[in-house]
Image (cartoon, grey):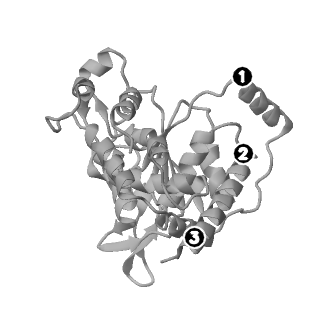
Amino acid sequence: MNLDASETRDAASRAQGLLARAREGMARRLVGKSELVDGILTAVVADGHVLLEGVPGLAKTLAVKTFAELAGLTFRRVQFTPDLLPGDITGSLFYDAPTGRFVPREGPVFTNVLLADEVNRAPAKVQSALLEAMEERQVTIGDRSIPLPKPFFVLATQNPIEQEGTFRLPEAQVDRFLLKVLADYPDMEEELEIVRRVADGMSAAHKPLLSVEDIEFLRSAARSVRVEPDILDYAVRLVRASRPTGDDGAPQALRELRRYMEYGASPRASIYLYRCARVGALFAGRDFALPEDVKAAALPVLRHRIIPSYEAEAEGITSDVVIRRLLSIVPVP
């Protein structure tokens, strides 16, 4: 939608109120986890998928389920295992005796919010089937391509410490995730509050605080956020700086940093960084993006797209460290 300046400011203000309401609703169930909550909400507004990484017991599943309830969306959870088949997710054809025809039976992917639990335990064929759903928003069963419900989000979890019975996610699939959000241990005060809440009985589900119409409004409001050319240029320069090969005119600090990069981010990262900067502006109630919005989105957008080199791994330098150094090197407009 095309809005004038006053309408755009009003839309940004309303969007901030909706996002604040969603944050507050999720905080009734979750203790802390602000990065996790904001990551889920950002992906919803930017129309992308989220990869959640953390050890078991850190409320990843609870966060996804809580969001689905508060948004009034259908929710399904699939526990990924090595013996899972593509049809277990997408559905399959079954023979309908009365009609003498094979009819598609829809699988759990036909939902608004799909929680792919321990997604890295699934074999390659299952990953391929999930990839079509994530990218094309459709599923092929037999000779038919069936569109998925709208909106559709995949929120996948993976355990970083277990290796037995796991399959490394293909880079093509990892790149389809808008964000990679890390779930970390709570601090002392947060863990005390978690224990108190569980001991006293977890609060019941609340009535939906958002609707499908609200989500569509938030997306329209995000598309109306103004991004000046120098802000877009900054986002693209940041992504281009993440690649191990680049312009000869790069500063010395960047040339030294490149030895810690095996592979860098694709142009899809530039697109997602642009989208997330717009959503970040909405969180702040602004109808225009700032360099700070780009910087705030850099870690979750880039951490799964920058592959550290062998030298980086040997020195304990993670992709997050590389990104923080990039943010200090690339000039801010």
**Residue marked by disc 1:** 188
User: What residue type is disc 1 on?
Assistant: Met
**Can residue 42 be seen in the rendering of this structure?**
yes
- For numbered disc 2, what is the local secondary structure? helix
Q: Amino acid type of disc 3?
A: Phe
The residue nearer to you, when weighing 267 against 129, is 267
Question: What is the distance, in whole Å, between disc 2 and disc 1 at their CAs?
Answer: 17 Å
Residue depicted at x 31% and y 20%:
313
Identify the residue at horizontal 72%, vertical 63% (top origin): 208
Dot 1 crowding, Cα within 10 Å, few <14, some 14–19, many 20+: few
The residue that label 2 is drawn on is: 27
Q: Is residue 48 above or below residue 326?
A: below
Count of labels in the image: 3
**Whole-Å distance between the Cαs marked 2 and 3?**
23 Å
Query: Which quadrant, please, contains the C terminus?
Result: top left
Q: Picture coordinates of residue 101 (x, y %)?
A: 37, 80
Q: Earlier in the sequence, mark 2 or mark 3?
A: 2
Which label's residue is closer to the chain start, 2 or 1? 2
**Which residue extends farthest left?**
248
- Where residue 166 appears, as percent x and y from the top left, is 38, 34
For the residue pair 277 and 190, the one nearer the viewer reads as 277
**CA distance separating discs 3 and 1:** 38 Å
Q: Is residue 227 left or right of residue 193?
A: left
- x and y percent of residue 227 in the render? 42, 59
Mark 3 = which residue? 217
Q: Residue at x 77, y 57 (%)?
A: 206
> What is the secondary structure assignment of the residue under circle 1?
helix
Amino acid under disc 2: Ala
